[in-house]
Image (cartoon, rainbow, N blue to C red):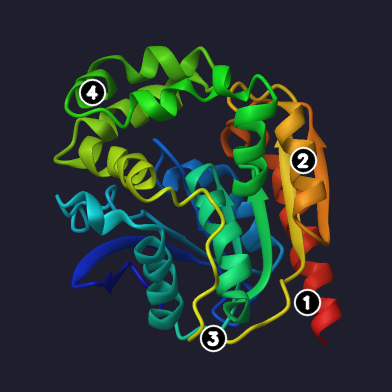
Amino acid sequence: MALTSFTSDSLIFEVIDIGPSDGEPVVLLHGFPQDASCWSEIQGGLVAAGHRVLAPTQRGYSPGAQPADRSAYAAETLIRDVVALLDAAELPTAHIVGHDWGGALVWIMRKRYAHRLRSATVVSTPHHAALSWAMTHTTQPLRSWYMAAVALPRVPEVFLRRHLATYISKTGLPEDRANHYQSVMQTGATATGALNWYRQAFAEQIRSTKPANSSIPATAPPPTTYVWGNQDAFFGRAVAERTQHIASEVDFYEISGGHWLPETKPDELTEIIVDRVKTAHTAQR
């Protein structure tokens, strides 16, 4: 039976679960300030290719999963939510795809939870070590100023609820999607929950490399694809290309597009994901 929700840390998460139950499972993780609907133009193509698609609305965004405590948004906790979804779906492993913050989680899972990944596809987000390098060696800080701004208390919530659509539509996101995401931020505690990903990241510096949890079995990284849009307003070419040098055995795809590839380049992205799943599945047979 298809899932409509699952629990993690006694919180209730919404999830889209479509496609054949015996298809190769593909989990789609959204970023900021999106929700699971960012994948709506991609889900159909994956299902048509025979895959089971699971797209959760993540912590801070699902109405039943909006803890107020900032520390509840630590990277390890966010990843445990993904693992809880896999367990709820009775999936020992799955192909994991992530965009923006979802992509940041995939990079970490690729190292620490490789035993749960059949393959990894990261969209837009560079490897955290590449981003750290770029912040001191390139003009990346000019693109990433917002990361510090949104970590401030209170004021960012007001901005998201009132002006988010105007801002993100200027970075290449279609106006209807920008308006939808602003409406999401106006619902309940979503704005604070979404911002807590950044606030906790600054508190714990989760973007720097951490030693792997010794309780997790050491496993070789899964087949991995990194997709970057060459007009990305937030991540420049230098950090994207640095990712290729830092992350071993990664297939790099450059798309003519901006940051919001799930919404603006769904056909190209679907093709890349389907190819990643197919080649990983063939290699594992």
Query: Which one is nearer the viewer's eye here, 172 or 248?
Result: 248
Taking 185 as reference, is 172 above or below it? above
Task: Tell me the amino acid under the disc marked 2.
Answer: Arg
Taking 216 as reference, is 121 above or below it? above
Q: According to the image, label 1 marks what residue?
A: 281
Residue 276 position within the rendered picture, expressed as x and y whole percent measured from the top left: 77, 61
At label 1, counting other C-alpha atoms closer than 10 Å, the crowd grade (few under 14, some 14-19, many 20 or more) is: some
Q: According to the image, label 4 marks what residue?
A: 161
Q: Report the mark closest to the observer, 1 or 2.
A: 2
For label 3, the SS is loop
Nearest to N terminus: mark 2 or mark 4: 4
Q: According to the image, label 3 marks what residue?
A: 92
* Quarter where residue 67 is shown: bottom left
- Asked if residue 193 shows in the view, the reply is yes
Task: Tell me the amino acid under the disc marked 1.
Answer: His
Residue 143 position within the rendered picture, expressed as x and y whole percent measured from the top left: 56, 21
Question: Left or right of 190: which side holds 200?
Answer: right
Query: Which one is nearer the viewer's eye here, 40 or 127?
Result: 127
For label 4, the SS is helix
Is the C terminus in the top left, top right, bottom left or bottom right quadrant? bottom right
Q: According to the image, label 2 marks what residue?
A: 242
